[in-house]
Amino acid sequence: MSFWQTLFSPNEQQNEHKNQVACIENDCSCKTNDQLLSLLTQATDEDVIAGIKKVLVSRGYSKKELNQLQHPPIQ
C-alpha cells in the first residue's frame, strides 16, 4: 500500500469503536443520572464505560469523580 493510501484510508476498527460508543451514548441519553451512575459501577465493557462517561461529563460530572466511582478507593 502506498503512503497516500495508508494516510487516507479509513481505520475500520477505530471507526467501529467510535460508532459503538456513539450508540451507547444515544441509548444512555434518556436515562437519569442515578441510573447511569449505577450502570457505570457495574459495567465491564470499555465501550460502554466510555459512552456512559461521555453522557455524564456532558451533564456536569468531572472525569475525576467518575473515575473514583468506577474504581472506589480501597479502605
Image: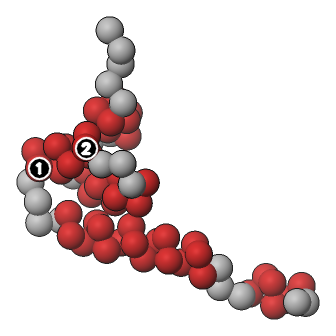
Q: Amino acid at mark 1?
A: Gln
Rendering coords of residue 66 (x, y %): 32, 38
- Which label belongs to residue 35? 1
Query: In whole angstroms, how far apart are the C-alphas of marks 1 and 2?
Result: 11 Å
Within 10 angstroms of label 2, few (less than 14), some, or many (20 or more) residues? few
Query: Where does the C terminus fall, quadrant-wise?
Result: top left
Residue 50 visible from this viewpoint: no
N-terminal-most mark, 1 or 2: 1
The residue depicted at 71 percent of the width and 88 percent of the height is: 9
Residue 27 in the image: above or below residue 50: below
Which residue was labeled with disc 2?
42
Left or right of residue 11: residue 39 = left
Q: Residue furthest top?
A: 75
> Where residue 58 sits: x, y (%)?
27, 55
Residue 33: x, y in percent?
Answer: 13, 48
Q: Nearer the viewer, residue 44 or 36?
A: 44
* Label 1 neighbour load within 10 Å: few <14, some 14-19, many 20+: few
